[in-house]
């Protein structure tokens, strides 16, 4: 019985490959549709914004908020939660200038300037990108170091 197994294992196996000629495939050439011109420019009025707060040292996402300030009148329009897509309120001013101040506890605040009516021109700044139909404003925050002045407020004491 042992001899039979050795003989079976020693016998070479034959591999039969069927060679076939490749079939010809007919493909249709489809022309790309013409792109329609964009009549309405993408501004903050018709496009949402994503405020990304992250640690500049290691790239971790931070919990914080972004203050939207009307630069012309120096008034706070709203405080918005960071790391989510939101609709920015209209400053209702001729210039449309906005100041965005990103802050997180234990980190230095960062300020970016945007224009509500001409936001596409603001994408030339390094911190502002247009990704699809969403404006992404990046706030790369750095830790507060010894010697920085920080005011603690809205703290809950137990």
Image (tube, rainbow, N blue to C red):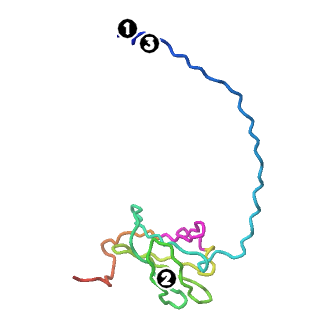
Give the Cα distance between marks 2 and 3.
82 Å
In the displayed structure, 53 sits above or below 27; it is below
Q: Earlier in the sequence, mark 1 or mark 3?
A: 1
Horizontal and vertical percent position of residue 7: 42, 9
Q: CA distance from mark 1 to mark 2?
A: 87 Å
Query: Which residue position is annotated with label 3?
Result: 8
Q: Which residue is mark 1?
A: 3
Q: Report the residue at 43% width, 77% height from top.
A: 81
Residue 147 point in image, percent of width and height: 31, 75
Q: Dividing the image into 4 quarters, which one contains the N terminus?
A: top left
**Figure quadrant of residue 2:** top left
Q: How many marks?
A: 3
* Magenta residue span: 122-138
Q: Residue 132 colored magenta? A: yes
SS type, badge 1:
helix
Residue 68 is tagged as 2
Q: Quadrant of residue 43?
A: bottom right
Left or right: 10 as drawn, with respect to 39 = left
Q: CA distance from mark 1 to mark 3?
A: 9 Å
Asked if the residues shown at circle 1 and circle 2 are in contact, with their CB atoms under 8 angstroms apart, the answer is no
């Amino acid at each position: 019985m042992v001899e039979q197994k050795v003989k079976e294992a020693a016998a070479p196996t034959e591999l039969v490959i069927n060679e076939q000629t490749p079939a010809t495939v007919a493909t249709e050439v489809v022309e790309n549709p013409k792109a329609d011109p964009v009549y309405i420019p993408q501004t903050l009025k018709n496009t949402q914004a994503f405020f990304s707060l992250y640690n500049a040292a290691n790239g971790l996402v931070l919990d914080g908020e972004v203050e939207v300030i009307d630069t012309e009148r120096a008034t706070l329009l709203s405080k918005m939660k960071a790391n989510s897509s939101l609709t920015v309120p209209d400053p209702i001013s001729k210039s449309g200038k906005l100041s965005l101040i990103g802050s997180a506890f234990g980190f230095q605040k960062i300020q970016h300037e945007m224009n509500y009516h001409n936001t596409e021109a603001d994408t030339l700044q390094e911190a502002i990108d247009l990704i699809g139909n969403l404006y992404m404003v990046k706030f790369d925050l750095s830790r507060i170091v010894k010697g920085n002045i920080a005011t603690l407020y809205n703290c809950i004491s137990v």
